[in-house]
Image (cartoon, grey):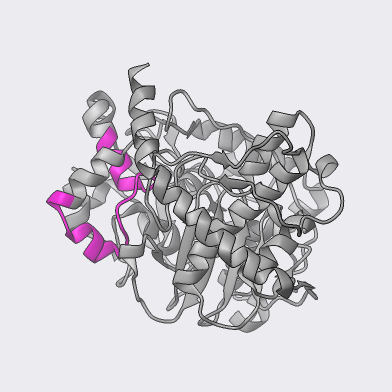
Amino acid sequence: VIDEKTTCIATGFSPLIVLRKKPLYSEQHPRAWWSAVQKAVSSIPKNVRNHITHIGLTGQMHGLVLLGERGHVLRPAILWNDQRSFAQCVELAKKTPSFVQISGNLLMPGFTAPKLLWVKEHEPHIFDQIHKVLLPKDYLRYLLTEEYATDVSDASGTSWLDVKNRRWSLPLLRHTGIDQDAMPKVFEGPEITGQITKKAAKELGLSPKVLVVAGGGDNACSALGVGCIANGDTCISLGTSGAYFVVRKHYQPQAKNAVHTYCHALPGLWHQMSVHLSSASCFSLLENIFSKPINRMIKGTFLEKHGLFFLPYLSGERTPYNDPYAQGTFFGLTHDTTQKQMLSAVMEGTGFALKNGQILLDKSQGSIYLLGGGARNTAWLHVLASILEKRLVFYENAPVGASLGAAKLALYGAKKGSKKDIFSCSEQGKILRGKPSLYPYYREKHALFNDLYRALQPVYRKKHHIGEMT
């Protein structure tokens, strides 16, 4: 919750779990999102809730939410990091090159369109019942307002949007067997999409006069939270996934490099993004292996040389490989390997994955703004600064960046200030710089990191097929 000066005055939180029934699968129950919203909103003091006038929505992109005629959920949502629809991507790309030409992006199993084609092929009884296709945050909008709507930034990640012209592409929709009637109406991020219903207002303890703006995808809103609204502004999101994000004033796709080109959540802007599917989540892996929290393992500096490598592909990888079969790999283990070296290798490996995006997207000398819960890990940030050879800027509000950006969109939609005043970051950021003496070491190790992936790429695919047989 922010006030009219964009000061964050309250936050609410409720955790969720991911369901992984089979290899490559990643799902959640949409009703669980609503339960989490109720818990998070009810944790906000009542005297604060009483003064809320507008809501902005943000959330994980690409997820497939299928509703029947009465608005009921037909199956669990298939999430952004679900990799089961790779075959459908290949089929669509062969039959319909216009997917890449119109959407400006490669077809990837994380995107929404191939997920729907997978449902059509494997669950035809579900497909036949579809009334509406929604993205995760827009299912919450439906429960809030009973309106079917989305925004251009989130819709960009479906493979159905004409990203240049910021509208649904009817030919692309038809290629997956649906028409525009099944889709929500597309809005720009600050536009009003509806008013909260009396039922939702009562459940959340809000005024029934509250208005809901379109909002934006998580990365676009995170960027707005730290003021990335001008051409060339750059930020990195360190959440479950990692994203290297650059604002563009013109539409200029780079699909062949698996770079995402999307509409920004403000009118007249686009952004490009490299996405690394497993970033801060790699540290959760180590916590499970060592049965202790990361903050107990992080002691002292991690800017030191060692021969251990970690390929951080726990859920496959997008940029630059578009490979759903890649997996997490430690390379170089010896009798003398320590926990600290393994943790250091994870910090380096996730940094090298982001470096691959930087090489494709960012030729500037400017600062990079940091977002997401991973930005609390100061030891990791020092490693990143040395790998990226850039000045990093961290804001205390960065961990709630996506929510903050959505709230700012709501304020802008309420016409409570200028774009510059609302989206500029007034907070004084903390600056982190790399260690120049380590730059040559990290450059050489980054090259070997990429050599390792190329050597293992055919092995990952063979291993997946063995897993299917068992």
The quarter in which the C terminus is drawn is top left
Of all residues, the one furthest to the front in this rendering is: 335
Name the spot of residue 108 as percent of width and height, x first. Answer: 34, 49
Q: Position of residue 131 (x, y in %)?
A: 29, 38
Q: How far across and how far down the image is residue 278, in percent?
A: 55, 46
Task: Write the start and end of the magenta stretch as one range.
Answer: 94-118
Picture layout, residue 3 above or below residue 450: below
* Viewer-proximal residue among 47 and 469: 469
Q: Position of residue 249 (x, y in %)?
A: 44, 81
Quadrant into which the N terminus falls: bottom right
Who's the residue at 79% across and 32% down the image?
292
Extreme top residue here?
470
Task: Work out whether 262 lies above or below 68.
Answer: below
Residue closer to the observer: 412 or 64: 64
Residue 243 appears in the picture as rendered: no
Q: Is residue 315 visible?
A: yes
- Relative side of 296 to 176, left or right: right
Q: Is residue 112 left or right of residue 408?
A: left
| Residue 112 part of the magenta segment | yes
* Residue placed most toward the observer, 247 or 175: 247
Number of numbered labels in the structure image: 0
Q: Residue furthest left?
A: 95
What secondary structure is the magenta-colored segment mainly?
helix
Which residue sits at x=45%, y=76%? 269
Q: Judge from the rendering whether residue 218 lies leftward or rightward of residue 459; answer left or right.
A: right
Q: Nearer the viewer, residue 302 or 278?
A: 302
Q: Is residue 32 magenta?
A: no
Question: Is the residue 468 above or below the residue 48 in the image?
Answer: above
Occupied quadrant, residue 4: bottom right
